[in-house]
Image: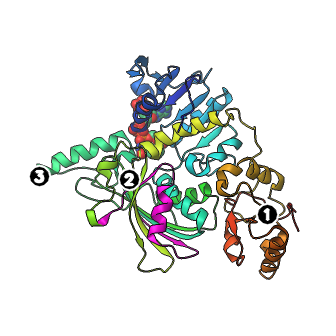
């Protein structure tokens, strides 16, 4: 695969001295060795620090109102507060912000992007694009190809997250606590809510009224937004473990129809950015130590869920600093360049709010339909030569009408026709070749090419 060049751009990195920032600069050297127009920014604490990238020495500057003049893309990976403060300033200066924090992820006008899953969403950015939480990204990389083939009804994800997910200071804390505990000395938690050395902590971020932590709620909300699938039921338990780098997750996925582990295996082998490491006979499965420093999301232990006829259980591991953060950000920049949409507002954004049912009032039917057509290759590569769009109130509002409608479609277009509609309605249209449009289509009033 050819990587679009970023060499002609001026790129600012806010948080260049942090755990994600350091990984970001490493990936720049690997993927863009000709990129020299960098501005390395942080807080006053590390202003003046010298860092070498692509053979050129840079001095880290304190981020200021003037930092973003002449910048094309600003990566912000510092803290939620820093993002809230600096992102609008960077956008006002003309930069596109790719933001690593949770500040903007669930905002309607901010695409939340994992390029292999919903890269087309970068086209409707209004100046800010968010990247997901580092546990959400690997989950959707695995869930989305399954969902496209066989709609997912429910996901349960239990994570085992490394300390680097909490920043450079938490990595240092694990080192210090491990050494102290081996010497029999007491430890006092500073960057984690409890002792992390030789322990696991079932709390990442603060608790919400519903009993979940913010980290868990992020996985629930973000995975549905990225997959354009507000109807999927998601639950997560996020646990911090004494691992330096790479997050793992034990995931249970329930689909509309039963699937064999071998089908899932084959499907994930074809997913760009996913590597299947699954041979239990030979003791082969992914582990955080081995995956640290790798770009891909690794999957193993693929098996039937013993508690659910339509369920699959699997084990996912990925480097949280790379695909979970820095690599995903750089891939978004590459996506912006290859789609030629650095400037905001080039494409109208889908009008509906994620999580709300579509209706005549909130569906931006024409824009959503154009979005689908423009991204046909990516959304439905296998069907691009033969599709029929039918987005009709009848389809979605009346169970009784669906078989009749599918008969009419088939009579006119033959068995090769594809019925395009919201993913949650597809499985109920019996005996018809149907496919999800990623839920991005206004479904209520577009009288498309038929009926
Ligand atoms: N770690 C992960 O796996 C991961 C994954 C996804 C998302 N994220 C998100 O990425 C962000 C950074 O995480 P991290 O792990 O790299 O944290 P980190 O190691 O603590 O580094 C924080 C960086 O931000 C800079 N910074 C702090 N406050 C700032 C401010 N007000 N203005 C400008 N720069 C400021 C720091 O500069 P100084 O050196 O001057 O202190 C440092 O470079 C967080 O929002 C985090 O939630 C992290």
Is the C-beta of the residue carrying label 2 under 8 Å from the nearest atom of ligand 1? yes
Q: Quadrant of residue 360?
A: bottom right
Of the image marks 3 and 2, the number of the one nearer the N terminus: 3
Cα distance between the residues tagged 3 and 2 = 28 Å
In the picture, the disc for residue 247 is: 2
**Residue 64 percent across, percent down from the top left:** 55, 24
Regarding mark 3 in the picture, which secondary structure is present there?
A: loop
Q: Where is residue 171 drawn, in percent x and y?
A: 31, 43
In the displayed structure, 448 sits above or below 339; it is: below
- Asked which quadrant contains residue 279, the reply is bottom left
Q: Give the residue number, with chain letter if any, for mark 1.
A: 443
Q: Is residue 23 left or right of residue 393?
A: left
Mark 3–mark 2 contact, CB under 8 Å?
Answer: no
The residue lying at 74 percent from left, 65 percent from top is: 418
The residue tagged 3 is: 184
Q: What distance separates the C-alpha of mark 2 from that of mark 1?
A: 38 Å
Give the residue at x 48% y 58%: 268
Residue 103 vs 97, above or below: the answer is below
Q: Residues within 10 Å of mark 3 (few under 14, many from 20)?
A: few
Few, some or many C-alpha atoms within 10 Å of disc 2 (few <14, some 14-19, many ≥20)? Answer: many
Viewer-side residue, 405 vs 107:
405
Write the start and end of the magenta stretch as one range: 251-280
* Mark sitting earlier along the chain (2/1): 2
**Which residue is pictured at 50% across the width and 20% down the height?**
36
Q: Is residue 79 visible?
A: no
Nearest the viewer among 28 and 430 is 430
Query: Eyeballing the image, is 443 above or below 38?
Result: below
Name the quadrant where ligand 1 sits. top left
User: Residue 183 placed where, x, y %?
Assistant: 11, 48
């Amino acid at each position: 695969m050819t990587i679009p060049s970023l060499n002609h751009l001026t790129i600012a990195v806010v948080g260049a001295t942090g755990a994600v920032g350091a990984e970001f600069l490493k990936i720049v050297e690997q993927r863009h060795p000709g990129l020299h127009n960098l501005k390395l920014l942080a807080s006053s604490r590390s202003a003046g620090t010298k860092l070498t990238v692509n053979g050129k020495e840079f001095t880290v500057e304190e981020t200021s109102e003037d930092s973003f003049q002449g910048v094309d893309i600003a990566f912000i990976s510092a803290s939620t507060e820093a993002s809230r403060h600096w992102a609008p300033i960077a956008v006002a200066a003309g930069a596109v912000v790719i933001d690593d924090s949770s500040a903007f992820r669930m905002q309607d006008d901010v695409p939340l992007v994992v390029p292999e899953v919903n890269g087309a969403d970068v086209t409707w950015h209004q100046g800010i694009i968010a990247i997901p939480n580092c546990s959400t990204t690997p989950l959707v990389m695995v869930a989305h190809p399954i969902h496209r083939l066989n709609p997912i009804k429910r996901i349960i994800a239990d994570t085992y997250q490394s300390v680097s997910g909490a920043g450079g200071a938490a990595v240092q804390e694990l080192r210090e606590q491990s050494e102290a505990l081996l010497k029999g000395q007491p430890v006092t938690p500073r960057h984690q809510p409890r002792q992390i050395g030789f322990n696991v902590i079932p709390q990442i971020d603060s608790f919400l009224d519903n009993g979940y932590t913010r980290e868990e709620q992020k996985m629930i909300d973000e995975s549905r937004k990225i997959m354009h699938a507000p109807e999927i039921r998601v639950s997560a338990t996020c646990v911090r473990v004494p691992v330096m780098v790479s997050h793992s997750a034990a995931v249970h996925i329930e689909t509309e129809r039963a699937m064999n582990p071998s089908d899932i295996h084959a499907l994930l082998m074809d997913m760009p950015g996913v590597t299947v490491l699954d041979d239990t006979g030979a003791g082969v499965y992914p582990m955080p130590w081995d995956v640290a420093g790798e770009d891909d999301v690794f999957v193993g232990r693929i098996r039937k869920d013993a508690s659910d006829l339509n369920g699959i259980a699997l084990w996912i591991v990925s480097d949280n600093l790379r695909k979970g953060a820095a690599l995903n950000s750089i891939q978004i920049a590459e996506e912006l360049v290859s789609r030629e949409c650095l400037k905001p507002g080039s494409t109208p954004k889908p009008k509906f709010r994620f999580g709300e049912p579509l209706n005549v009032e909130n569906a931006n039917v024409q824009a959503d339909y154009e979005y689908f057509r423009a991204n046909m290759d990516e959304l439905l590569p296998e069907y691009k030569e033969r599709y029929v769009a039918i987005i009709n109130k009848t389809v979605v509002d009346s169970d009784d009408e669906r078989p009749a409608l599918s008969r009419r479609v088939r009579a006119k277009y033959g068995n090769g026709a594809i019925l395009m509609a919201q993913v949650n309605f597809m499985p109920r249209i019996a005996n018809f070749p149907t496919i999800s449009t990623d839920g991005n289509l206004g479904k209520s009033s577009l009288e498309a090419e038929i009926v």
